[in-house]
Each structure stands twice: as structure tokens, then as C-alpha cells.
Image (spheres, rainbow, N blue to C red):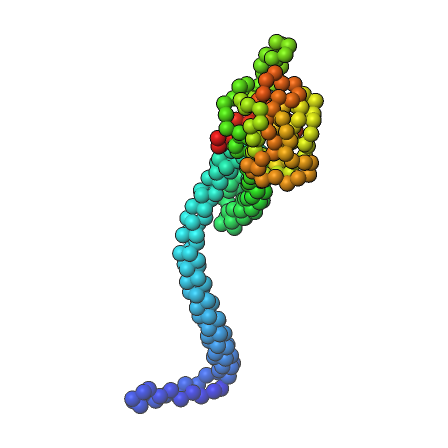
């Protein structure tokens, strides 16, 4: 038996309560278990409190990310739209340069389509691929521009002498046979002994007598471009000589296959004649 003294706060009630020993033990066990449970709850609460703090911080970061991400996506869309105009720009630049670049495997960049439900990273990957392709295309364009610059610098942009054209470039009736023939150059009216000038700087590839052309000169201007001057009375340069644009290379005459004194003038690109008037800017 265990006696417990119960006293009220104001001291007016005092009583002894007798508890059987078994009940007292049970109460003690309940008290101990209650204390342990309290401690466990306290530990758990502390852990929850820490988790809550972490969640609040994470939420802040997420909100910040969302704030940054929205304008980022908008700008990505703008970049994509701007890059979408590159294809038409390329076409516009390539057209006067003769279209497809030599040795280039196509000029169309990768499609700018973003996979449906694509993430921002997918979008950036697509744009990155497009930018890399663009670098390749720009290098090709740069190469073409350099080549075009070389061709422009080599084109004879003037006539070898100032005068009218007796006979133009292209199909005509032969003044010898009366039958159709192809005139590979133009015939410039020129009395015997008229000074003939190089139409562009270059190196004399031929100077002497050639079948049909008589006394003639061929100048190599580089980039596959040559000019030829025929029916000369006198040749004033020799093979391998460097000549400047406008330099005297001979005097016009009536040698070779010629009906009357005049200057036969040709421009050749990669060995094929073109109409000299197509490239002439001066005279
Ligand atoms: Zn001719």
C-alpha cells in the first residue's frame, strides 16, 4: 500500500489517499512514458521547424527564379524571331554573289522549331545549334566575298581605246564567208597605229602572232580572267611582262584575219569569252 498526501493550494483540504502498490507502479510507468513522449514530440517539433525554415527559403528562391525566367523566355523568343530572318538575309546576300557558295554543303541552317512542351534549355540548345551553323555560313560568305573581291579587282572595267563598236559580241554573219559564226569579242573602230592600252593590270601571257588574231596580246589579270587584243600593227610588250592598267601594249592595225584596220578585243573568264561590254564601266 502507498499513502499519498493530497493538499489543496489554500491548505484547507488535506487528505491521505491510500493506493494499492500495483496502481502506484502503473501511475509511475505512465508518468515516465508520458515524459519520454513529451521529449520525442519536442525533438520532432524542432525538426519540423527546421524543415519549415528550409521550405520558406526554397520558396523564395523559386519565386526569384520565376521572376527571372519569364523575361528570359520572352527574350529567347525575340532572339529566335530575329534569327529566323537570317535565312532570307543569306539568300539576299548570296544572290548577287551567284547563289550557292562553291564547295559549301547547302546554306539552310537547322530549323528553329522548338519541340512541343520544350524546356528553356531545349530552346537554348536549338538556338546554340543555329548560332554554330551561322558561324559556318558566315565563314563561307566571307570566303565568297574575298573571291568576289578578287574577281572584281581582276575585271577589265575599261576599253582598250576610245571609239565606237563596229561589230558586237555574239552570233553574226561572217564577213568572210557570209555564213553564221560566233564573234568571241567586239571590234573597235581604230585607224592603223592607234595606241592600245591594257584594260586591267596583269601579266602578259602571250605576245606575238596567233592564227586568225595576227599580231596579238593576251593579258592574265588573275582570278581566271584574261583579255585579248588582236589584229595589231605592233606589239609593245613581251611574254611574262607585268603591265599596269592603261599601259600601252601595242598599236592597232590590220594583221591576221581582218578585212580592214580595227581592234578586236576579247574578255575571257576561265578560258571562255564573255561580252566585254558586260564588265565595262568606263570609256
Ligand atoms: Zn573581231
In this view of the protein, which residue sits in the foreground, 47 or 278? 278
Q: Position of residue 222 (x, y in %)?
A: 63, 38
Q: Single out the residue that lies furthest toward the front.
A: 193
Q: Position of residue 213 (x, y in %)?
A: 66, 23
Identity of the residue drawn at 57% across and 37% down: 247
The answer to whether residue 133 is seen in the rendering is no
In this view of the protein, which residue sits in the foreground, 44 or 183? 183
Q: How many marks?
A: 0
Identity of the residue drawn at 44% across and 85% down: 18
Identity of the residue drawn at 51% across and 81% down: 25
In this view of the protein, which residue sits in the foreground, 175 or 261? 261
Q: Position of residue 146 (x, y in %)?
A: 57, 42
| Vertical relation: 9 (above or below) 45 | below
| Vertical relation: 126 (above or below) 174 | below
Residue 267 image-quadrant placement: top right
Identity of the residue drawn at 63% across and 12% down: 176
In this view of the protein, which residue sits in the foreground, 99 or 263? 263
| Vertical relation: 255 (above or below) 178 | below
Q: Position of residue 153 (x, y in %)?
A: 56, 39
Residue 145 image-quadrant placement: top right
The answer to whether residue 253 is seen in the rendering is yes
Q: Is residue 189 left or right of residue 208?
A: left
Amino acid at each position: 500500500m502507498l499513502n499519498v498526501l493530497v493538499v489543496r493550494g489554500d491548505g484547507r483540504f488535506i487528505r491521505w489517499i491510500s493506493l494499492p502498490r500495483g496502481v502506484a507502479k502503473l501511475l509511475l510507468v505512465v508518468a515516465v512514458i508520458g515524459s519520454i513522449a513529451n521529449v520525442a514530440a519536442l525533438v520532432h517539433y524542432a525538426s519540423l521547424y527546421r524543415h519549415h525554415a528550409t521550405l520558406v527559403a526554397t520558396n523564395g528562391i523559386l519565386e526569384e527564379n520565376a521572376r527571372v525566367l519569364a523575361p528570359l523566355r520572352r527574350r529567347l523568343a525575340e532572339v529566335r524571331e530575329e534569327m529566323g530572318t537570317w535565312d532570307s538575309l543569306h539568300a539576299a546576300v548570296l544572290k548577287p554573289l551567284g547563289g550557292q557558295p562553291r564547295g559549301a554543303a547547302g546554306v539552310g541552317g537547322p530549323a528553329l522549331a522548338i519541340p512541343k512542351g520544350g524546356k528553356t534549355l531545349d530552346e537554348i540548345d536549338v538556338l546554340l545549334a543555329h548560332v554554330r551553323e551561322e558561324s559556318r555560313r558566315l565563314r563561307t560568305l566571307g570566303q565568297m566575298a574575298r573571291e568576289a573581291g578578287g574577281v572584281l579587282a581582276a575585271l577589265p572595267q575599261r576599253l582598250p581605246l576610245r571609239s565606237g563598236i563596229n561589230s558586237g559580241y555574239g552570233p553574226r554573219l561572217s564577213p568572210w564567208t557570209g555564213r553564221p559564226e560566233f564573234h568571241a569579242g567586239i571590234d573597235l573602230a581604230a585607224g592603223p597605229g592607234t595606241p592600245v592600252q591594257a584594260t586591267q593590270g596583269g601579266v602578259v601571257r602571250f605576245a606575238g602572232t596567233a592564227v586568225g588574231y595576227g599580231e596579238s596580246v593576251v593579258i592574265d589579270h588573275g582570278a581566271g580572267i584574261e583579255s585579248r587584243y588582236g589584229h595589231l600593227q605592233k606589239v609593245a610588250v613581251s611574254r611574262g611582262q607585268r603591265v599596269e592598267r592603261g599601259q600601252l601594249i601595242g598599236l592597232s592595225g590590220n594583221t591576221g584575219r581582218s578585212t580592214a584596220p580595227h581592234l578586236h578585243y576579247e574578255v575571257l573568264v576561265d578560258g571562255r569569252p564573255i561580252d566585254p561590254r558586260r564588265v565595262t564601266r568606263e570609256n
